[in-house]
Amino acid sequence: MKLAMKLAWRNIWRNKRRSGVILTAIVVGLLGMVFMIAIMDGMSSDMVKVSIENGVSHVQIHREGFLENMSVALNIRNPGYVISKIEDMPGLKTYAERVKVRGLISSPENSSGVLIWGINYEREPKLNSIASYKVEGEFLSGKKGEIFIGKALAKKLKVELDDKIVVRGQGLATEIVSAAFRIKGIYVSTSPEYDKYNIFINLKDSQNLFAMNDRVSEIALMADDLDDVDSLAMSINNEIGVQGLKAETWKEIIPLIVQMVEMFTAFNYIVFVIVVIAMAFGIVNTILMSVLERTREIGILMAIGTKPIMVFGMVMWEGFFLGLLGLVFGWIITIFFYAILLKTGIDFSIWADSLKYMGGIGTTIYPVIKGYNVFWSSFSVFIAAVLSALYPAIKIMRLTPVKAFRSV
Amino acid sequence: MSGGKNLIVTLAWRNIWRNKRRTIITVSAVVFAVTLSIFTWCFAVGEHEMMISNTLKIHTGNLQIHDLGYWEDKTIYKSFIPPEELTVFLEKDKRIGAYVKRLNVDALISSGSDTGGVLLIGVEPERELEFSSIKKKKVSGEYLKPGDSKGIFLGETLAKNLNVKVSDSIIVICQDYYGAISAAKYILTGTFKSGSPDMDRSMAFITLDAAQYLLSMDDKVSEVAIFLSESRSLKKVTRDINGFLDPEKFEVMTWDEMLPGLVQAIEMDNAFGVIFFGLIILVVIFGILNTILMAVMERYREFGVMMALGTKPRDIVKLVLIESAFIAILGIIIGNILGFGITYYFTIVPIDLAEYAETLATFGMDTEIYTKIYVWVFVITDIVILFSTLLSALYPAIKASRLKPVRALRYV
């Protein structure tokens, strides 16, 4: 077998131009395939990351049914007790309690439907990027009557920093309540849609306004690691599930994003298959011809007693080496570009508006080459090369020396 | 060999069949690229058209007329009474399929136990039914009845959020035209599910009269939405309307200006499609380049003989190019037939993507996707493939034509 390998290696270098062209095809195919998928994956992980960091967090605890209609009546009656139960759980990084009520915000000029977040101004920034989106004024500081709203909403309401606005909603006793707030700060997040819909006030103010006493709507949690999320949710449910409370992971809270990621991944596998088929056509022909032009030579090999299986092995090794070389060159170039793109990112700002459909990801996409991408693209290139060699190899194995000499 | 055109063509045709196996593999590569391109492209274009028409049919329409500046700043103060000449035009012009007047306002909606913010829209039910597909999106109860000033029609998510069922009463509170707080009670007639999470969560419909009464604004509307019988006439209709409306007072907006997200989603999808198709062509073309290069190299001796006998280098280039053209054309013909077959099959049997229903709904797509045959897709694919094949043959062709007969004859 060693001889067959050696022969195969030398055969590849006999016609450098031919091997060069087909290696280029493999390299281009690999590069294109890896990056198309890396961009898709980059978008997917951005979508998940942005959603998690914009308040979804890893796990949320609610009264069962809260997610369906966000009713004020479905609240956590004793947040202090729940927190004391989960505080020391392994894998928990941080938590924050919130009030969430849908309502209406009005200025003298205009009004708009919003989601009112009553948040703990100290704990919330630890698991929510909202404070870092601040562009004017200050984030909440715990003082009475502060409100933090999005730039797009401020524009719609025609209000500025320190202006007064009225927030209206329904309290726990089902009456419509309202209160005036002063704009403490204005933020711009990754998506104008988000900015228009989400407003932030202090937890205490929201509990007073909606007559909730010390109750909260949800407790959001961050795990130490994305992989710990499921086990964390499970141990919380074991602890508090009996009280009608339920811990749900981000996957259950934003199923749309999860489904979008799945759809992207399904497309990625289609890309693998199609690119590989396209590559295989070129490789089959290259190997087939390099074998056919050596018909005479191989006839001689067989006439002097080389076994057909050895000839078969030699051609298969040629496919193997072509695939291997393609992978080596392909990955060197891919890693080179990856290193650059990881720093610069790819500018998608011309499609800014459509990215908001994807959970408000930023306009610079950083490709992410994931393990499955490395594995499947390498595997499929390799398989394409080896399988392509199979047909010429079987053909040449069946050659009889006499026939071989008769050919050109 | 004094270069008769027919001779070169005959020679080229025979040459490609000298090694049948190789030609078949190369043609297959072309067939693969052509079929793939035709099918995926027809699929994508059909899908995009569906996205657009579904989205426009639900609510937006092909174009809208507003008070100048309304789109930027959606307040009830930017409203207007549709001028006489506009209604006359919309009634008379045949290109107008239907048109509706609407009054939009942000309001607070409450079922007693639950409350939320909504976009309250006053509509003319009888016209709206001609105009939009909202009736088909109904999941419970009935759509608004003309003249039913007490009825309200809600998005499914919104109804769920409010915890209401058909014939429950609902309170709407908002600021009227004069800044006073205005409230009214309505009865839920039914709910709809458009697929757009945003719409299902935030839209509530009442009759236009009821809305005008609630807001104390007689006859004023926020938008006139127009649905064309043929979307092709969009530009002309827009121009005609702009012709008689005062541009200082009104704005005429087409759907692509109102839904930039949809336009860009399609553009992005197209860009990905072009990159992907480009990648496939590149990979296939390198394969073809290699095949032709080798087919040329193994005939160096033969070319040498031809040139020694007086064939001009130009004719050698022609010969190689015609050979590759034959390969490309064969591949294109078979690819077109296959591509047509597959695409046609999916115009009858839909591709079922129910697994991704929610994602598709956000983009305004159905879960069963039918393809459509677009002749221009076939034409463009064929041209691109033919030219890239010829381009890849250029290098081997020129290489062959530069041969010196003496050296070529010496070549093994």
Image (spheres, coloured by chain):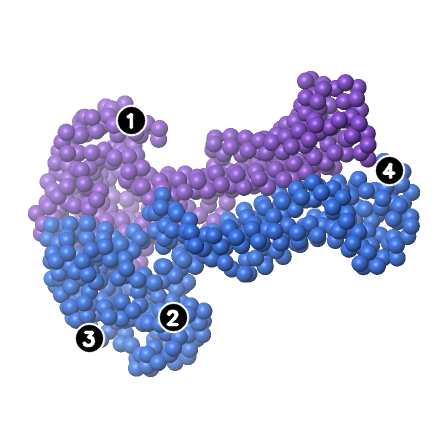
Secondary structure under the numbered disc 2 in the rendered image? strand
Q: Is residue A372 left or right of residue B24?
A: left
Q: Comparing marks 3 and 4, which lies closer to the viewer?
A: 4
Give me the C-alpha separation between circle 1 and circle 4. 72 Å
What residue did someone put label 1 on?
A: A231
Q: Comparing marks 3 and 1, which lies closer to the viewer?
A: 1
Q: Residue at x 44, y 40 (%)?
A: A266
Secondary structure under the numbered disc 4 in the rendered image? loop
Quarter in which the N terminus of chain B is drawn: bottom right
Give me the C-alpha separation between circle 1 and circle 2. 55 Å
Q: Chain of mark 4?
A: B
Name which residue type carries label 2. Leu
Colour displayed for chain B in the image of the structure: blue
Q: Is residue B81 left or right of residue A336?
A: left
Q: Comparing marks 1 and 2, which lies closer to the viewer?
A: 2
The disc label shown at residue B218, or none = 3
Q: Residue at x 10, y 40 (%)?
A: A213
> Looking at the picture, how far across and down is residue B327, in whole percent?
69, 49
Q: Chain of mark 3?
A: B
What residue did someone put label 2 on?
A: B228
Chain corresponding to purple in the figure = A
Name which residue type carries label 3. Asp
Of residue B273 and residue B79, the one placed in the foreground of this image is: B273
What residue did someone put label 4 on?
A: B411
Q: Chain of mark 1?
A: A
Of residue A366 and residue A406, the one placed in the foreground of this image is: A406
Q: Comparing marks 1 and 4, which lies closer to the viewer?
A: 4
Say if residue A140 shows up in the picture: yes
Q: Comparing marks 3 and 2, which lies closer to the viewer?
A: 2
